[in-house]
Image (cartoon, rainbow, N blue to C red):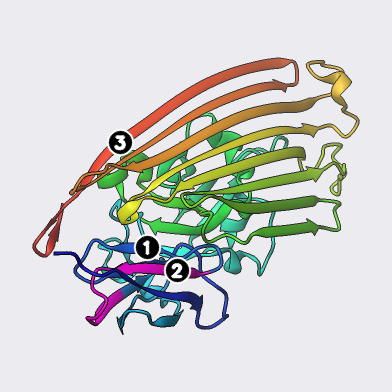
Amino acid sequence: MLQAQSQIRGSVSDRSTGDKLEAVTIALENSTIATQTDEKGNFALDLTDSTAAHRVIVSYVGYESDTLAVKPGEMLQVKLRPARDLQEVVVTGTLKPMSRMDSPIPVEVYTPRYFKKNPTPSLFDAVGMINGVRPQLNCNVCNTGDIHINGMEGPYTLILIDGMPLVSALSTVYGLSGIPNSIVERLEVVKGPAASLYGSEAMGGIINVITKSPEKAARLSVDVMGTSWAEMNADLSLKARLGNHLQTLLGINYYNYQQIIDRNGDGFTDVTLQNRVSVFNKWNLIRKHNRVASLAARYVYEDRWGGQTGWSKKWRGSDSIYGESVYTSRWELIGQYQLPTKEKLMTQFSVIGHHQDSYYGTTSYQADQKVAFGQLYWDKELGNHSL
């Protein structure tokens, strides 16, 4: 028996701002039929019965879901309400998305709006605004640092990017200052031990950097910041949609500080001079049934030095004038893919390449490191319990 086909059409927007929302899921209740809004917030959903009334569920990360009774041929104007803080979706406490209220581990969430109260060029400087979190410089010459949570030393703070342990080993020395705020959608902070999920590196706590997603980012964003010390930080990001199934986000960050300052008169630079560029590119594949598929890449190059104020690059490796010079070249690749199975099986992987060419006075350090990480997890619901 053939059933007549019909559609409902409409658009979805933010109730408070009126902005159109892209990649919102509109699903037919008790059915596998679903669609998503396009970049203008519009959608069209096919129905199997042209006469019966239906109920559709409209859902989007960071917003309260809405269930509507609709009739075939109806035009909808859906306005979603931003979720309250306790309903924010977090992943750090359980390795899977769930509301903060339901998370067994307390997770604090910080968005870029919070950090704009005191603009900073990097994540390392920004987290100092979080209660109980303290970035600490361990060397006044080269400005290497780590992050302490509730007084625990830096090696016991685990830094994740999209749930992957990218900031480890060599990158813990200078890598924290190479993460620009422009790629951050939110920070999830866990204070206190979380070793059962993440190992001994998380004894002090966790900072999980969730990078921006193409569907939620602005089409074009430009942000330039300068300080009285002649620091300059510039961020550029743009997104594009390629066809109906592919979205991409490109972010470029440039930071420059070349002002030699010696306020205490000891003959050494007070702040390390830096020249850094970071390029971030993320791709999302739009799949059936809201299955996840994403790939992100980042490249960072940094030239930093500190030491006696008369130092220049011609003295690199010399004992005539003391200086510490570090060249860093680093690339990262992160991906996740949900298998096309009835059960929710998710794969995640990361690959890192890090090269450091440095001189500390006359002492040379040449370091190369490559790290790969992968995991497969099964999200299974058994009654009121999760595995």
Magenta residues span: 41-56
At horizontal 63% and vertical 49% (from top left) the residue drawn is 180
Q: Nearer the observer, disc 3 or disc 2?
A: 2
Tell me which numbered mark, 2 or 1, is placed earlier along the sequence. Answer: 1
> Residue 43 — which label?
2
Q: Which residue is mark 3?
A: 375
Q: Are the two marked residues, 3 and 1, in contact with CB atoms closer than 8 angstroms? A: no
Q: Are the two marked residues, 2 and 1, in contact with CB atoms closer than 8 angstroms? A: yes
Q: Residues within 10 Å of mark 3 (few under 14, many from 20)?
A: few
350 left or right, relative to 145? left
Outermost residue, left direction? Answer: 383
Give the x, y percent position of residue 48. Answer: 24, 68
Give the x, y percent position of residue 188. Answer: 44, 58
- Quarter-of-image position of residue 317: top right
Secondary element at tag 2: strand
Q: Is residue 106 visible?
A: no
Q: Which residue is mark 1?
A: 35
314 left or right, relative to 367? right
Q: Residues within 10 Å of mark 2 (few under 14, many from 20)?
A: many
Tell me which numbered mark, 3 or 2, is placed earlier along the sequence. Answer: 2
